[in-house]
């Protein structure tokens, strides 16, 4: 370690919803829709002095075999509305909503995020995502005709246009571009943060470039210290081209964690949680996404299906596509053979994301190690239980990070930008 | 014994963008026992104001009983987003949400979106009617008991209780189901503002979809006859509140308003539109509400928790539920 001062860690809390992170079968798993659940997690995050609270989005219920997927949590509130309500019961916590740029228009979203920023006293953040999915498009006026490349340029122009509206305090903004030809002014003065914080996920070259040019925070998914360091260095290097300093973009991977009294207990608990998350039905569904045909007779605790996948199947809808199915199946067979894994064990292995597992001291040490070595600037924590799943982290790990001098004892500012150490656009 | 009336109040405060201002007004209205408050909205650049639905979501946890009815326009918005946003307002307020249906008719608003030109009001109201229809179908698209958490079979929901709404209209189509479970009130309260001289498309929307009409008709006889016509078409479940502009600088004005309200006939209540919300709402609660309560016109306290409870409106069954389908079949076969 060099003699430089300790880096300060940024932490955010994700309310897990529509996926198999949440172990809803656990008796401690509460409502996924009542306001009290969101309130509990947000209040816990604020008690832990977290930077922000984060909500994901999905605009159509997932389907498998043309039927609504029923094995995981289904149903969630509209994020911006919920965050406005959480602004009433929190004081400093940033409030981040994932909102799709494909099925919205810049003027309306700029206004909604400016309103959230005003009504929360400067705590709004927007996680920009896009979709090219005709399946989701069936719920919207525009349908789903954007191809992958187009949806990406649209997203970049969308964010740019929103910023022009946020800046147009004295005179109307006029924007003419390939995707938007608009003119107008919001019914709001400049909001406390000038521009609400912009978050972006994306590992592709285009995604990294977009984040370097336009985002304040980027997600990543790099499970090892080395991969995280490489990603960190690459993204931070890109900032100079846009006249930005390295600390103007925070890298915050989404991670799960499992805490117990001892490291051994935590490892055992983590294995149990993974088995609860990936049950027999989930295993079959996951394989069907690649194989493209009905596998309901397949034994999840046996080897992978012997037959080859069917290409160009539309069996599974509303979920990220996994790529060329035949190549993927071959890859999976190789992994399963090398590690002697059943179908279910393989899916557990494939769907695992970066996870900190151990005693509070171990987890605090792991997090600190990643941040001090520039593999990340902080983490978005995804508990496997809601609403109480963050309690142990805030009570156990946060004090240890504070003792190490790498996490704030208390908030020093009132806005999310101030927590993140980001400049406020338009400030004189 | 006079009939108890329903009361609501507009919180519109041009120039105010902070949450504490609106929260204080709503709490005052709640202290007075009003059924609900409204907040206007549009995509025009002025006056300065925040998004109305966002504002009411923001103040929901700071109030406990008052109904929250923001204007949401149907013209440049996505009906799917509107449905889940109003639904979520119902969740965060634990059953106190309504929706004052609006349209955006100006060229400036159309330019801000750049998707289409300004259209005649009649088109906008027929589109609004479709937007309310699809929102209601989406609210119903989850039956109340769709979430089962059946550990034995590993199923979180019973997918037979989630329904595609398959709406195909002139302006848009929506497949469904909603991504948000059915709201606490089943359907949040739909509110439409009308004048006696309104376009048939707007009145048609009110007759088909509204739970509450805010009627702008200053002449008492004309108001009575409009209420009679609306009831005839919409049925007894419709509540018609007559708009009354309120300025209460002194006790004389308060006494005059009390007499005007007490003398009303044939209406379900009043929608108060204060000239100065801070002054006039406080004066209403202090000077007018007790006098109305004494005469039995304003109820003491809230009869229940939800806006539907306050208005005496039943919680609707999901149209897709077995019970509702049985009821419809019985109706048809009669």
Image: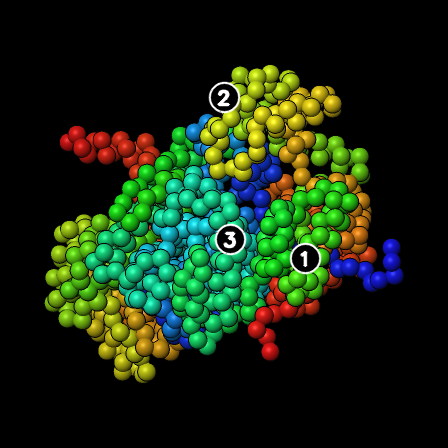
Q: N-terminal of the two: label 1 or label 3?
A: 3
Cα separation, mark 3 vs mark 2, equals 37 Å
- Judge by depth and name the residue closer to the eye, A53 or A417: A417
A258 sits left or right of A196 in the view: right
Q: N-terminal of the two: label 1 or label 2?
A: 1
- Judge by depth and name the residue closer to the eye, B269 or B179: B179
Q: Which residue is mark 1?
A: A238
Q: Circle 1 — which element? A: helix
Badge nearest the viewer, 1 or 2: 1
Chain letter of mark 1 equals: A
- Count how many numbered circles sit on residues in the image: 3
* Badge 2: residue crowd in 10 Å (few <14, some 14–19, many ≥20): some
Residue B109 on image: x %, y %: 34, 65
Badge nearest the viewer, 3 or 2: 3
* Badge 1: residue crowd in 10 Å (few <14, some 14–19, many ≥20): some
Q: Which residue is mark 2?
A: A294
Chain letter of mark 3 equals: A
Residue that appears at 34% across and 39% down: B165
Q: Circle 3 — which element? A: helix
Q: Which residue is mark 3?
A: A153
Residue that appears at 17% across and 30% down: B333
Cα separation, mark 1 vs mark 3, equals 18 Å
Q: N-terminal of the two: label 3 or label 2?
A: 3
Residue B214 on image: x %, y %: 25, 62
Q: Circle 2 — which element? A: loop
* Badge 3: residue crowd in 10 Å (few <14, some 14–19, many ≥20): some
Residue B163 on image: x %, y %: 37, 35
Residue A137 on image: x %, y %: 41, 43
Quarter of the image where one finds residue A171? bottom left
Position of the N terminus of chain B by quadrant: bottom left
């Amino acid at each position: 370690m060099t003699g430089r001062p300790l880096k300060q860690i940024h932490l955010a809390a994700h309310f897990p919803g529509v996926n198999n992170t949440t172990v809803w079968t656990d008796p401690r798993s509460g409502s996924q829709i009542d306001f009290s659940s969101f309130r509990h997690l947000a209040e816990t995050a604020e008690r832990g002095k977290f930077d922000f609270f984060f909500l994901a989005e999905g605009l159509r219920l997932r389907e498998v075999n043309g039927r609504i997927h029923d094995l995981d949590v289904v149903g969630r509130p509209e994020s911006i509305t919920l965050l406005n309500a959480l602004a009433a019961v929190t004081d400093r916590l940033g409030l981040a909503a994932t909102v799709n740029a494909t099925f919205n228009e810049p003027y309306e979203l700029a206004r909604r995020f400016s309103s959230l920023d005003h009504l929360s006293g400067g705590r709004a953040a927007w996680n920009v995502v896009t979709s090219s999915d005709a399946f989701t498009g069936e719920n919207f006026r525009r349908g789903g005709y954007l191809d992958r490349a187009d949806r990406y340029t649209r997203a970049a122009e969308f964010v740019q246009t929103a910023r022009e509206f946020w800046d147009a305090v004295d005179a109307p903004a006029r924007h003419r571009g390939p995707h938007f030809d608009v003119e107008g002014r919001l019914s709001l003065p400049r909001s406390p943060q000038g521009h609400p914080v912009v978050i972006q996920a994306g590992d592709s070259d285009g995604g990294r470039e977009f984040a370097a040019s336009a985002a304040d925070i980027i997600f990543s998914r790099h499970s090892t210290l080395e991969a995280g360091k490489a990603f960190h260095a690459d993204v931070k290097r890109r900032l100079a081209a846009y006249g930005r300093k390295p600390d103007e973009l925070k890298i915050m991977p989404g991670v799960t964690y499992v805490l117990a009294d001892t490291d051994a207990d935590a490892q055992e608990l983590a294995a149990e949680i993974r088995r609860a998350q990936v049950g027999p039905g989930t295993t079959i569904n996951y394989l069907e996404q690649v194989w493209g045909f009905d596998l309901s007779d397949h034994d999840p605790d046996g080897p992978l299906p012997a037959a080859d996948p069917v290409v160009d199947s539309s069996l599974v809808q509303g979920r990220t596509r996994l790529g060329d199915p035949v190549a993927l199946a071959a890859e999976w067979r190789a992994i399963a053979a090398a590690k002697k894994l059943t179908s279910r064990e393989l899916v557990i292995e494939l769907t695992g994301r970066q996870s900190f597992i151990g005693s509070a001291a171990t987890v605090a040490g792991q997090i600190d190690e990643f941040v001090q070595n520039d593999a990340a600037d902080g983490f978005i924590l995804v508990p496997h239980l809601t609403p109480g799943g963050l309690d142990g982290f805030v009570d156990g790990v946060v004090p240890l990070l504070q003792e190490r001098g790498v996490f704030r004892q208390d908030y020093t500012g009132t806005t999310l930008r101030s927590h993140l150490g980001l400049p406020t656009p338009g400030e004189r | 014994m006079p009939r108890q009336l329903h009361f609501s109040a507009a919180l519109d405060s041009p120039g105010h963008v902070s949450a504490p201002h609106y929260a204080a007004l709503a709490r005052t209205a709640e202290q007075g026992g009003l059924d609900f408050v409204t907040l206007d909205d549009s995509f025009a650049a002025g006056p300065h104001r925040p998004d109305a639905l966002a504002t009411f979501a923001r103040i929901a946890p700071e109030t406990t009983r008052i109904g929250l009815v923001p204007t949401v326009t149907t013209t440049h918005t996505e009906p799917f987003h509107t449905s889940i946003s109003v639904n979520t307002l119902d969740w965060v307020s634990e059953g106190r949400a309504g929706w004052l249906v609006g349209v955006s008719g100006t060229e400036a608003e159309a330019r801000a979106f750049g998707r289409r030109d300004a259209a005649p009001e009649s088109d906008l109201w027929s589109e609004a009617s479709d937007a309310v229809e699809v929102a209601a179908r989406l609210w119903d698209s989850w039956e109340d008991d769709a979430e089962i958490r059946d550990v034995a079979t590993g199923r979180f929901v019973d997918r037979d209780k989630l329904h595609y709404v398959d709406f195909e209209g002139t302006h848009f189509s929506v497949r469904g189901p909603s991504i948000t479970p059915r709201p606490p009130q089943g359907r949040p309260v739909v509110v439409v503002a009308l004048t006696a001289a309104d376009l048939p498309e707007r009145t048609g929307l009110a007759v088909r979809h509204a739970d509450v009409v805010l009627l702008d008709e200053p002449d008492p006889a004309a108001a009575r006859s409009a209420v009679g016509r609306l009831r005839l078409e919409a049925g007894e479940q419709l509540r018609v509140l007559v708009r009354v502009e309120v300025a209460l600088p002194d006790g004389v004005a308060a006494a005059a308003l009390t007499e005007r309200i007490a003398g009303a006939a044939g209406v379900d209540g009043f929608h108060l539109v204060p000239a100065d919300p801070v002054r006039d709402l406080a004066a209403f609660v202090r000077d007018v509400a007790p006098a109305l309560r004494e005469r039995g016109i304003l109820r003491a306290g809230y009869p229940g928790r939800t806006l539907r409870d306050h208005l005496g409106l039943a919680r609707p069954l999901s149209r897709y539920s077995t019970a509702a389908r049985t009821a419809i079949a019985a109706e048809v076969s009669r």
